[in-house]
Image (spheres, coloured by chain):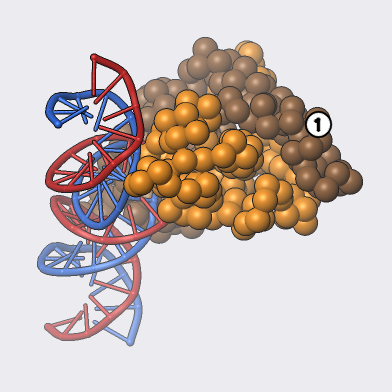
Chain colours: A orange, B brown, C red, D blue
Amino acid sequence: MDIADVARASGLKPSTLRYYEQKGLIRSAGRHGLRRYYDTTVLERLALINLGRYVGLSLDEISQMLLPNGVDVDRALLRQKTAELDKQIATMQAIREGLHHAANCPAPNHLACPTFQRLLKLAGKRLKPQQSKL
Amino acid sequence: MDIADVARASGLKPSTLRYYEQKGLIRSAGRHGLRRYYDTTVLERLALINLGRYVGLSLDEISQMLLPNGVDVDRALLRQKTAELDKQIATMQAIREGLHHAANCPAPNHLACPTFQRLLKLAGKRLKPQQSKL
DNA sequence: TCTTGACCTAAAGTCGACTTTAAGTTGTAG
DNA sequence: CTACAACTTAAAGTCGACTTTAGGTCAAGA
């Protein structure tokens, strides 16, 4: 497949694919003249990359996790990321509760409300970011 | 309090506070000569801003939510954000499950595994970002 | 009174993840 | 065989959220 096919199949732009290649995240199977061609395993690798981006990893972190040969993942890092994700989810749920309460709280001013107070403290400690797009 | 006090109390740098003021997110209570001074309600406003950042709002979105007068929040937007957060949490949990599975899956290659396959599809549809720092 | 550390402004710089642009090359349909 | 749509590269641009820098002002302690 050529770059346009991969773009179509992955939802990424050709420029993004070239960029990922430049960063060492993917490789083309070769060239026809100047033009890259890819085999279909690149799609799985891209899916893995999307997954990583989804859970908030940077491209650099992702390239550490992706084993350069083949299409697999570093399991230790995976476990670590799972644990981080657990914490993040817990905090988000607490905040979600707080927001829900705030949205329906009869107090004229949220800051008067003890539930909201707790919420503000919770958000005080920011965790790691979660990047993603579209 | 002067800007250094607010910085200390909020965990934000003076430069960030000036930046937030420039963006219209906060206001100082006045000046002593050139120097800004603040009253303590700015701390609550900053806590609210942190909260917004935490749940993935941009500074522009936050300034829409914060009522310019006083220290309160737009409740409709709050409800909407709560709903978005629900979706986001659900997806993160699914992915968390998938990662957990992958980290402990005996298959030599995750891509062989149907659980991981589902996971990859899930991550395909990226949601909105969640920004935050530190 | 003098010094100095904390403050001020405007403008430029940074970072990650791309996208866009400018200029050039080429596989392929007609 | 020719045209041209689709590819190529290197470099510059963009976006959000800040931070840093350069150059200046000033309140307060010694």
Q: How many marks?
A: 1
**Does residue B34 show up?**
yes
Question: Which chain hosts label 1?
Answer: B
Residue D5 drawn at (x, y percent): 27, 23
* Residue B15 sits above or below residue B80 on the image: below
Name the quadrant containing residue A61. bottom right
Residue B100 drawn at (x, y percent): 81, 42
Q: Depth check: give the residue in front, B58 or D10.
A: D10
Q: Mark 1: which secondary structure?
A: helix
Residue at mark 1: B115
* Residue B81 sits above or below residue B133 on the image: above
Residue A113 drawn at (x, y percent): 64, 26
State the residue at coordinates (85%, 44%).
B107
Q: Depth check: give the residue in front, C26 or A46.
A: C26
Q: Residues within 10 Å of mark 1 (few under 14, many from 20)?
A: some
Q: Depth check: give the residue in front, B71 or A59.
A: A59
Residue C11 drawn at (x, y percent): 14, 53
User: For the residue marked with disc 1, what is the amino acid?
Assistant: Thr
State the residue at coordinates (79%, 37%).
B112
* Residue D21 sits above or below residue B25 on the image: below
**Does residue B50 show up?**
no
Is A82 displayed left or right of C26 in the figure? right
